[in-house]
């Protein structure tokens, strides 16, 4: 479990100056849960990722990963439990060949060669990369590089996989395939997944959405619950899925739309049901 209690963080630019990035966060993320974290630039998302992966440490409060406090002396134990994939895979891939890069993390854990080979094989298969294990990293597409980065993170057998905007540089179809793969891995491996994203169409695919603004959590719940707060989301500079926005406008005009509306199919079904109800009503 990931637990944050009263967590604040400030970037210090001098003795007297401190730039607050996180302010009193309280958050619990259960094992196996998939969570999308959204917010505009400067909301604190990237700082939160750095704290969860022991790159930075709280100025106030405490973070615990599986009961282990995120402190400098526990850095290695934290990073064994939480793996991260960054926006630009080139910043993360360190070896020349695909299979060597996937093996890099397990090798640093000092695992036996047989265990390393087993992890590399299963991770490549999970990401559909088994046929390119011997290829050079430099010959891969952007989407393939991101999948290699995820395979390397998966080979560490983390309890939580953190995705720090890994799809922002990818075409939409490739990004959605990558998210689908991650969701499959979450089910098959039992990992918790935290996906930092600007994409509302990606956020709706997760179990839970956490909205950040000015270093605070302003909304937290299922996608259906969060995306009903259309005006609040716009106040903090975020868009909402088009279907949710249209549903909000129709409800404001008195159209009785029932159920959760997050995509075109939901909206079409809700509108059809409302029209049928209206036609059946007397008068």
Image (cartoon, helix red, strand yellow):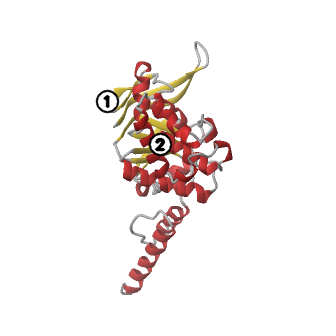
Quadrant that contains the N terminus:
top left
* Viewer-nearest residue: 101 or 40: 101
Residue toward you, 81 or 237: 81
**Residue 92 drawn at (x, y percent):** 59, 36
Q: Residue 192, image x and y in percent?
A: 39, 44
Residue 46 vs residue 118, the one in the foreground? 118
Residue found at x 46% / y 22%: 59
SS at mark 2 in the image: helix
Counting the numbered discs, the total is 2
**Residue named by callout 2:** 120
Can the viewer see residue 38? no
Which residue in the protein does label 1 denote? 67
User: Which of the two discs, 2 and 1, sits closer to the camera?
Assistant: 2
Give the residue at x 44% y 80%: 275
Q: Quadrant of the C terminus?
A: bottom left
Labelled disc at residue 3: none
Q: Is residue 25 above or below residue 210?
A: above
For the residues marked 2 and 1, what is the alpha-carbon distance in whole angstroms? 28 Å
Q: Secondary structure at mark 1?
A: loop
């Amino acid at each position: 479990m990931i637990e944050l209690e009263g967590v604040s963080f400030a970037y210090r630019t001098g003795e007297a100056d401190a730039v607050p990035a996180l302010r009193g966060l309280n958050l619990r993320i259960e094992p196996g849960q998939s969570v999308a974290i959204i917010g505009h630039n400067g909301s604190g998302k990237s700082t939160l990722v750095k704290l969860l992966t022991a790159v930075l440490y709280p100025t106030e409060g405490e973070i615990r990963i599986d009961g282990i406090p995120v402190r400098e002396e526990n850095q290695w134990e934290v990073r064994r439990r939480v793996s991260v994939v960054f926006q630009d895979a080139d910043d993360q891939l360190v070896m020349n060949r695909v299979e060597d890069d996937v093996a890099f993390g397990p090798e640093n854990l000092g695992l036996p060669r047989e265990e390393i080979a087993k992890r590399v094989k299963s991770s490549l298969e999970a990401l559909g990369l088994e046929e390119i294990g011997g290829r050079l990293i430099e010959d891969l597409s952007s989407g393939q590089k991101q999948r290699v980065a995820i395979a390397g993170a998966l080979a560490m057998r983390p309890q939580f996989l953190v995705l720090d905007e890994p799809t922002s540089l990818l075409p939409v179809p490739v990004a959605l395939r990558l998210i689908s793969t991650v969701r499959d891995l979450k089910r098959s491996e039992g990992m918790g997944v935290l996906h930092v994203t600007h994409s509302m169409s990606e956020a709706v695919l997760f179990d839970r959405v956490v909205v950040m603004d000015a270093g605070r959590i302003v909304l937290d719940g299922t996608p259906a619950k969060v995306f009903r707060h259309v005006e609040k989301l716009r106040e903090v500079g975020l868009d909402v899925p088009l279907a949710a926005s249209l549903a909000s406008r129709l409800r404001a005009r008195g159209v009785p739309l029932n159920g959760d509306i997050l995509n075109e199919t939901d909206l079409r079904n809700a509108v059809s049901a409302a029209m049928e109800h209206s036609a059946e009503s007397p008068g």
